Image (cartoon, rainbow, N blue to C red):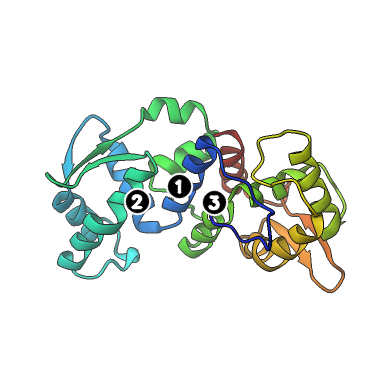
Amino acid sequence: MTNYAYGQTSKRATGEEKRLNATLKALASPVRRRLVAIVFDAPQSTQTASELAERLETADRTLQVGSLESLLVDLHHRHLPMLSDAGLIAYDSETKRATAAIETSTLEEGTLDAFEVEFTNGFEFPDRSAEETDALFKALADPRRRCILETLSDRSHAVTVESIAIELTSQSDAGTDRSIAPGDWRHVVGAITHADLPLLEDAGLIEYDPDANRVRSRLGSDRDSETAAIVELSASC
């Protein structure tokens, strides 16, 4: 887990947290999201890296994947290994063959209908650019930022950064499995102010006023269904 904190403010992530972090980070790329959709379109079939590169090159010109040769190198050395580490795709670097690593029916049962449709269609949401989707997955790919969203989820009003830090540290003191170690909440304030809150705001998940030192959740009726689905997935995995 990336430690953005100053001092001892983060504890070791659990195995489930590490897997969820890796999954969300892996999906913070339109190329990798499309790869997952292609592989899961025929989950029982094995496809070579070359076949996947050809499908990516011809299926969507908006991906800006470059030449077929450079794309193949990126798939073999970066994209497919990252998806494999996240447990989404099984990739054999010797044979350069990939297949689905999880049961798609199991995944679909654990997600919202809106997310299921977009997942099988390549994660390309009609009302959001690829960059916005990248930012969303990146923001959620850290357990502390997911804790911040959970802390804000039941509040209809803006709260101070200090109150968020106090609640995060008190959760750890209570013996929860959050990735926030017990300690001085003032250390957590510095970490979330400089690292977490800007990323969450860039992803459109919160409203953050650094001058007033207040934060408000943007999750609600004004947020589109796909964002809500991804946030729920990150909280339930």
Q: Closest to the observer: 77 or 207?
A: 77
Three-letter code, disc 3: Ala
Contact, mark 1 vs mark 2 (Cβ under 8 Å): yes
If you read the primary sequence from the N terminus, does the residue marked by circle 1 or circle 2 appear first?
Answer: 1
Which element is circle 2 on? helix
Contact, mark 1 vs mark 3 (Cβ under 8 Å): no
Q: Residue at x 15, y 50 (%)?
A: 51
Residue at which label 2 appears: 82
- Badge 1: how crowded within 10 Å, few (<14), some, or many (20+)? many
The Cα atoms of the two marked residues, 1 and 2, are separated by 8 Å
Please tell me whether residue 159 is drawn above or below residue 115 in the rendered image.
below
Can the viewer see residue 124 in this picture? no
Which element is circle 3 on? loop
Residue at which label 3 appears: 141
Residue at which label 1 appears: 22
Q: Residue at x 54, y 51 (%)?
A: 141
Instruction: Please provide percent x and percent y for residue 90.
Output: 27, 38
Three-letter code, disc 1: Ala
Three-letter code, disc 2: Met
- Residue lying furthest bottom in this view? 211
Direction from residue 163 to residue 131 in the image, left or right: left
The Cα atoms of the two marked residues, 1 and 3, are separated by 7 Å
Instruction: Please provide percent x and percent y for residue 38.
Output: 29, 44
Direction from residue 201 to residue 91 in the image, left or right: left
Q: Residue at x 21, y 58 (%)?
A: 58
Can the viewer see residue 50 in this picture? yes
- Badge 2: how crowded within 10 Å, few (<14), some, or many (20+)? many
Contact, mark 2 vs mark 3 (Cβ under 8 Å): no
Image quadrant where residue 209 sits:
bottom right
Please tell me whether residue 217 is drawn above or below residue 214 in the rendered image.
above
